[in-house]
Amino acid sequence: MSILRKISILFLTSFILMSVIGFWIDNINSKRVDELIKEKYLKIANEIFQNIDNNDRVEELIKKYDLVRVDKDDESKREVLYFEKHTFGFISIKKGSFEDEFIIEINFLDESYNLKTPNEENINDKLILNILIFLDTFVLLLIFLYLLKLLAPLKKITKGIKNLSNGDFNNKIEVKSNDEMQMLSDALNSMATSLGELLKSREELLRDIGHELRTPIAKGKFVIQKVENVSQKELLQKIFLDLEVLTNELLELEKLNSTKLNLSIFSAETLVTEALSKLYINDESSITIEIEDDFKIEADLHYLSVALKNLIDNALKYATVLPIAIKISTKKICVINRGKKLSKELDYYLKPFTQELSQRDGFGLGLSIVEKIVAKHNFSLLYSHEEGENIFCLRLV
């Protein structure tokens, strides 16, 4: 889960919790205040009602409790807090036009009083509390938005790191925030520049070495033709052939570190055909092909065919009985040969210059090249040994 999603979940949780708490507090305070107001003004209303036949006493009470006479208006929208009917009249307490004002209505025979109460401090305190809760929620929202702004450069940095992992050292990360995020992006840009220069120097060195090695190898192969001793001639040819193969495989292995894939869409059958074309097979009956599902693949045809070619080549070298089999099923191509199970885990053989038997041909670079090609495509290489058969599969998903 991304940091942005985690922060969003924390914010929503806090926001909902604060809203629920605010609503709950407001509801409790409203009920508490309404009860206090009702008790307070009911006492005043009863006192006025009991002295309603004494105008002077009523006026004294109105003045004493800071009540103000008001005209009777539309009361349909007012909330009734209390209503009690008496033999010759009634007492009613309602909320006024504003939350902190109340209307006391007293009616007895022909006498009627509509009295507005002074502003209630309890109501004001409740409003202040509600405002504080709202401000707290608003500040929480501002903090969330500010955090989003602070974390926004992470997307650019993540994208830049992915570019670096894919071998793109020229794509710089542009972050202008004057904080640790910018320091991190500048450090990554500096590292990308250094790595790019280092890899460029290494590529030039390997290219030069490869060129310099091919020249003496070609001269040596030419000189061998003049050797008359047959056994010595075959030995020298084998030595120079091994040197040529080793040079080519080392250069191919190194090239994989910096080469970008040339992606295209092709069928599994096309991949197998391309891989077989890279091999020198004297007897075609040594390989059988079984196609269950000729699915489509999006990959670099050249490099993926090299990987499959190496698996086929190894299967031919290490098979105790021919033919070997190439099986194409849904999103998977397997190369199967009869032979002993690998003595070590597959990871051991994916390292350069490791192989099962030292006396076999090759230098232990084939599976290492396969692993690099497969990893570059985000595919996977699987191995199993079942019923006396070694099964190497390219899972192309």
Image (cartoon, helix red, strand yellow):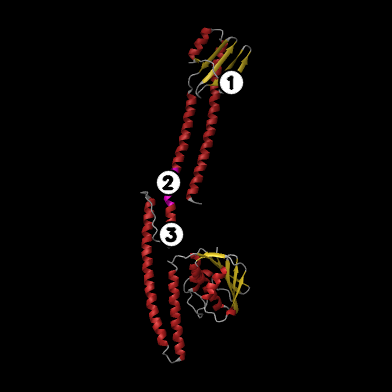
* Real-space CA distance between mark 2 and mark 3, rounded to the nearest whole angstrom: 23 Å
Instruction: Indicate the quadrant where residue 32 lies.
Output: top right
On screen, residue 121 above or below 253 = above
Instruction: Indicate the quadrant where residue 84 lies.
Output: top right
Q: Residue at x 44, y 75 (%)?
A: 248
Q: Residues within 10 Å of mark 1 (few under 14, many from 20)?
A: some
Q: Which residue is mark 3?
A: 163
Of labels 2 and 3, earlier in sequence is 2
Which is nearer the eye, 266 or 34? 266
Q: Residues within 10 Å of mark 3 (few under 14, many from 20)?
A: some
Q: Is residue 161 visible?
A: yes
Q: Which residue is mark 1?
A: 82
Which is nearer the eye, 267 or 122? 267
Q: Secondary structure at mark 1?
A: strand
Q: Secondary structure at mark 2?
A: helix
Where is residue 282? Give x, y as percent. 55, 81
| Kind of residue at disc 3 | Asn
* Real-space CA distance between mark 1 and mark 2, rounded to the nearest whole angstrom: 53 Å
| Kind of residue at disc 2 | Lys
Q: Which residues are magenta?
A: 145-154
Say which mark, if any, is on residue 149: 2
Where is residue 30? Give x, y as percent. 54, 28
Where is residue 266? Give x, y as percent. 54, 66
| Kind of residue at disc 1 | Tyr
